[in-house]
Image: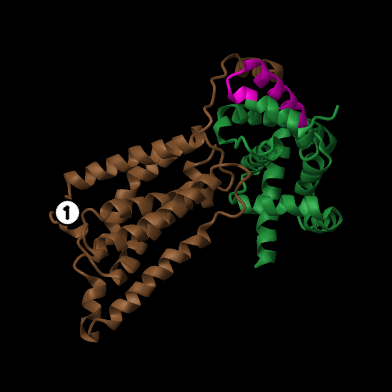
Amino acid sequence: MRIGDDQLRALMLAGLDGDGASHAALLELAASLLRAFYRRRIADADDIEDLVQETLIAVHERRASYDRRRPFSPWLFAIARYKMIDHIRRRSRLQPIDDVEDLLAADFEAPSLARTDLARLLDSLPAKQAAAIRNTRIEGLSVAEAAARAGIGESDVKVSVHRGLKALAARVKGQKR
Amino acid sequence: MRTDDLIATLSRDVPAVPRHAFGRRIALGMGLGGVATLLLIVATIGVRPDLGAAMRGFPFWMKWAYTASLGLVAVAATMRLARPEGARAPLLWAMAVPVLLLAGVGIAELAHTPPADWVRMWLGASWQYCPWLVLLLALPIFAGLLWSFRRFAPTRLRLAGAAAGLAAGTWSATLYCLHCPEVSALFVLTWYSLGIGLAAGLGALAGPRLLRW
């Protein structure tokens, strides 16, 4: 099913005028668009659904920030992108939002280059941390699956991912300077 | 909660959003903050006693033209940054126009003043506290804008915070003109702009924390 922006915009405008049925239809369509958007960028299925819901709530609460004269999709995806960056930053406890954006941009725009860089960076980490990051962040395993594969505890996986990402961030920053 | 249930809950109560709700919300936040700032001026430092006479002279209108034109640009930039996608060009370069115009007046002023009086003219009688008062009086307006932003969706928080601080600073300076008896263009260019800049800097510092959603 392909949804045109005109259709979304018409539903949004009707919702802004107080039509609950149109608003529900809009959120329904937006949910499937958002699910596709996050699926391409995030591995964990629970995280995807959390993000979809969080974004729907933001769309609902912050409808006043939509400009009636403009297309709907850019507004929706700008919110989705913001929520994703916020989510990743919270997850990996990387402080500056700019770094996350850089990582994302590198991932989207030069996947092969980024993959080589990533492999090289991961090789510089202790084997356990590298494996934990590879399993959960690149191959998209859940924490439990990654723990089973490596034969260690779940909290061990989480700590390894956390420490590894932190070390990687420090290394990437060091390279830039 | 399942996503379908969430959608059903959200769609149960869908209040209409009036056509100009966005602009009205900015105006209301800034307006309430501005009233608070005005009351603060009246209650503490006071309106200058010769306001009526001053409003018939050039310096008063020069100051207002400067702060208000900066204020319009700042509000326009704030409104752009309050929307998630419209954050590309926040218009701030347009502020160069009033700055350069005021600098031109300042140069003319220097040409008509003996060099021995230049420093006194530049420092006026209140340079030590003028920037701080502009900053302090910007806080209620900034708080009003924070309230406005609760229904908006900024995605570049630092820039949005800076723009909101700038808007608060410029309108605080505009209201401060009702108290301030200084007449020199160079004074305004330096010390008013410094106060406005401090407000923008504070906004940039606080933005990522206070505007997060």
Identify residue for label 1: B52
Q: Colour of chain B?
A: brown
Residue B213, position as x, y percentages in the image: 55, 36
Q: Is residue A65 above or below residue B206?
A: above
Residue range of the region highlighted in magenta in the rendering: A14-35
Q: Compare residues A145 and B76 and report the one nearer the observer.
A: B76
Q: Compare residues A109 and A61 and report the one nearer the observer.
A: A61
> Residue at point 71% right, 37% down?
A73
The quadrant where residue B61 appears: bottom left
> Residue at point 42% right, 50% down?
B167
Q: Colour of chain A?
A: green
Q: Compare residues A131 and A97 and report the one nearer the observer.
A: A97
> Residue at point 78% right, 51% down?
A107
Q: Is residue A173 left or right of residue B28?
A: right
Q: Is residue B1 left or right of residue B108?
A: right
For residue B38: magenta? no
Residue A104, position as x, y percentages in the image: 73, 49
Q: Is residue B165 above or below residue B122?
A: above
At label 1, the amino acid type is: Gly
The quadrant where residue B1 appears: top right
Q: Which residue is farthest front? A: B56
The quadrant where residue B198 appears: bottom left
